[in-house]
Image (spheres, rainbow, N blue to C red):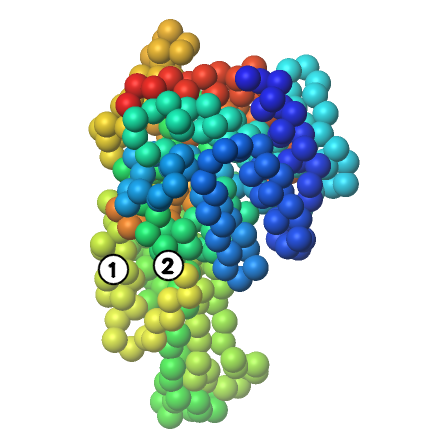
């Protein structure tokens, strides 16, 4: 299967499918779909962002058993990166590991298995993962495209990523009363008010200096509209970037509100859900068995990730899923590659996983 996967991957890499090129997002999607063959293809589009859902049979089932999710957009790269080449068992190019090779592998696994398995299997191709996935995966989820289990082919070195952190961006704003800097008692200092809140914040979410699987809060900015020395500031604000683990999902917002107290105003700019699927989920167990069975060892690991993927859009509505992808490196860098031998393993593992269900 590998020669076909590599051929298609190279063709996909040569299309500059970045968000700056909406026409090429359509082109890369159509190029992939041309390879799928005789299946039902539903096309979607929101905000100029195309995506597709492919399945066997004429009618879309209420719920698929498995959705294989791949994104065909990439972050911008150097010109040369759109000319893929192979060297020493690696395929180089923009999107090689993130994630055109695995999307090609998912496509062929789907193509070869969808008519053979006795359950509904779907291939979901999207073109906006790198800018949040709102008009691709999330839009399709909003259209009622559901599954028991979703696999996104993000690179995981053939391990299984079942958890990533949620993200909250928040401004804490305080107000006071201006006065001349020599007559403090006539004013109320908004910056000191803010500082007292930040002290409580630091006590609750201390800075960490070693990687840890914990909820963290980064103090990104502190500012005031005051521009001079001899004035009591009547406005101040702090910008926070909170990254929370699944266990703290319910408690993080109340905790931040409590720390801010009644005197501050909170402005939540982002609240991106975490992704969490329990390690004992039966599909995770079967996928782990497929990996271990393929290599004849027990080496597959469950991973936690600090960064997010499209899986969070399904996790947010209670659909289980994982990131599972081949071995590669250099995503979003000038030197991106995917290992071709492991890409072949990736295809075979997915095929035996789908057979085992
Ligand atoms: Zn990706």
Residue at (40%, 11%) from the top-left corner? 294
Question: Disc 2 or 1, which lies upstream in sequence?
Answer: 1
Q: Position of residue 317 (x, y in %)?
A: 29, 50
> For the residue labelled by badge 1, is the local secondary structure a helix, a strand or a loop?
helix
234 with respect to 262 (left or right): right
- Callout 2: few (<14), some (14-19), or many (20+) C-alpha neighbours within 10 Å? some
Q: Position of residue 225 (x, y in %)?
A: 52, 80
Residue at (23%, 55%) from the top-left corner? 251
Q: Position of residue 197 (x, y in %)?
A: 33, 67
- In the displayed structure, would residue 214 be above or below residue 222? above
53 with respect to 290 (left or right): right
Give the image quarter of residue 152.
top left
Give the image quarter of residue 266.
bottom left
Q: Where does the C terminus fall, quadrant-wise? A: top left
56 with respect to 103 (left or right): left
Residue marked by disc 2: 271
How far apart marks 2 and 1 lie (CA) works out to: 15 Å
Q: Would you say residue 330 is visible in this rendering?
A: no
> For the residue labelled by badge 2, is the local secondary structure a helix, a strand or a loop?
strand
- Callout 1: few (<14), some (14-19), or many (20+) C-alpha neighbours within 10 Å? some
- In the displayed structure, would residue 70 be above or below residue 355? below
Q: Position of residue 135 (x, y in %)?
A: 48, 56
Q: Where does the N terminus fall, quadrant-wise? A: top right
Residue at (53%, 86%) from the top-left corner? 230
- Give whichever of 292, 301 is nearer the camera: 292
Q: Which mark is residue 255?
A: 1
Mark 2 or mark 1: which is in front? 2
- In the displayed structure, would residue 225 be above or below residue 57? below
- Give whichever of 268, 75 is nearer the camera: 75
Q: Is mark 1 within 8 Å of ligand 1?
A: no
- Give whichever of 287, 159 is nearer the camera: 287
Residue at (33%, 34%) from the top-left corner? 120
């Amino acid at each position: 299967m590998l020669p076909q996967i590599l051929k298609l991957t190279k063709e996909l890499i040569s299309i500059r499918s970045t968000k700056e090129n909406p026409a090429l997002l359509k082109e890369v999607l159509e190029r992939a779909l041309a390879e799928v063959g005789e299946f039902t293809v539903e096309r979607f589009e929101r905000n100029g962002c195309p995506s597709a859902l492919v399945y066997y049979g004429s009618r879309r089932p209420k719920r698929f058993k498995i959705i294989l999710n791949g994104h065909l957009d990439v972050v911008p790269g150097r010109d040369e990166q759109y000319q893929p080449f192979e060297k020493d068992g690696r395929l180089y190019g923009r999107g090689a590991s993130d994630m055109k090779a695995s999307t090609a592998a998912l496509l062929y696994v789907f193509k070869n298995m969808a008519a053979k398995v006795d359950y509904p299997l779907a291939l979901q191709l999207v073109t906006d993962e790198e800018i949040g996935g709102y008009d691709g995966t999330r839009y399709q989820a909003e259209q009622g495209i559901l599954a028991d289990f979703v696999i996104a082919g993000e690179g995981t070195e053939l391990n299984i990523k079942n958890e990533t952190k949620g993200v909250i961006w928040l401004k804490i704003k305080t107000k006071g009363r201006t006065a001349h800097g020599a007559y403090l008692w006539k004013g109320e200092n908004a910056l000191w008010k803010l500082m007292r809140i930040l002290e409580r914040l630091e006590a609750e979410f201390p800075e960490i200096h070693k990687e840890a699987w914990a909820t963290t809060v980064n103090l990104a900015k502190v500012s005031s509209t005051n521009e001079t020395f001899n004035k009591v500031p009547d406005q101040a604000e702090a910008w926070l970037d909170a990254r929370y683990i699944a266990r703290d999902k319910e408690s993080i917002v109340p905790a931040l509100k409590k720390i801010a107290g009644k005197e501050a105003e909170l402005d939540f700019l982002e609240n991106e859900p975490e992704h969490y699927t329990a390690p004992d989920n039966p599909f995770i167990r079967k996928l782990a068995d497929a990996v271990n069975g393929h290599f004849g060892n027990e080496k597959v690991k469950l991973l936690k990730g600090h960064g997010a993927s499209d899986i969070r859009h399904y996790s947010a509505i209670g659909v289980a899923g994982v990131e599972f992808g081949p071995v590669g490196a250099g995503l979003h860098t000038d030197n991106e590659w995917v290992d071709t031998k492991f890409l072949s393993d990736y295809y075979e593992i997915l095929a035996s996983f789908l057979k085992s269900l």
